[in-house]
Image: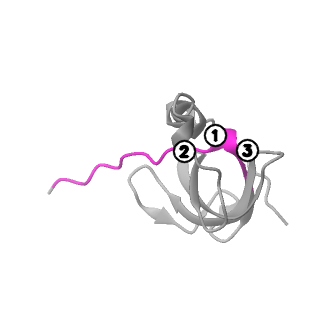
Amino acid sequence: MHKHIDWDAPGNASVTRHYASDKQHEVQPHPGMMLSARYQGMVVRVEVEAYREDDALSIGKVAALIDTQGKRHQTHDDLSVGDYVRLPDDKRALEPAIEDEED
């Protein structure tokens, strides 16, 4: 069973927007590919197990939950690493740059 997730809008990090003018480099998700999205401010990495082209929807398992400082978590709200989710193409997001802590 897939967990229903209300993904955050990707805004300027939208994969769809990024490739809108460069279709030759746009890649359709395939099994084993790692995708990213945003959920309640966290970065969620999803390992694709299947892709439904008709729905532009990836189905996969949550591989990582990462906060804005780059710290990994096992759970966030009701989402956990290992949960199966559906990730629409329009909610996919580019990975944010995480700044290294200065000594």
Which residue lies at the image location 38% right of the left edge and 52% below the top edge? 69
> From this viewpoint, which residue is outermost toward the front?
24
Q: Amino acid at mark 1?
A: Asp
Which residue, given by chain and number where applicable, does mark 3 sit on? Answer: 6
Which quadrant: the C terminus?
bottom left
Helix, strand or loop at mark 1? loop
Disc 2 to disc 3: CB gap under 8 Å: no
Which residue lies at the image location 65% right of the left edge and 55% below the top edge? 29
Camera-near label (2 vs 1) is: 1
> On the picture, is 67 further left or further right than 87?
left
Which residue lies at the image location 54% right of the left edge and 64% below the top edge? 64
Question: Spatial distance from mark 1 to mark 3, Cα to Cα?
Answer: 7 Å
> On the picture, is 57 further left or further right than 1?
left
Which residue lies at the image location 65% right of the left edge and 50% below the top edge? 28
Q: Residue 71 at what x, y percent from top left?
A: 42, 61
Disc 2 to disc 1: CB gap under 8 Å: yes
- Residue 41's tag is 2
Magenta segment includes 4: no
Which residue, given by chain and number where applicable, does mark 1 sit on? Answer: 8
Which quadrant: the N terminus?
bottom right
Q: Label 3: few (<14), some or many (≥20) within 10 Å?
A: few
In the image, residue 24 above or below residue 32: above
In the image, residue 51 above or below residue 23: below
Question: Spatial distance from mark 2 to mark 3, Cα to Cα?
Answer: 12 Å
Highlighted magenta segment, given as a residue range: 86-102
Lower sequence index among marks 2 and 3 = 3
Q: Amino acid at mark 3?
A: Asp
Q: Nearer the viewer, residue 24 or 83?
A: 24
Q: Label 1: few (<14), some or many (≥20) within 10 Å?
A: some
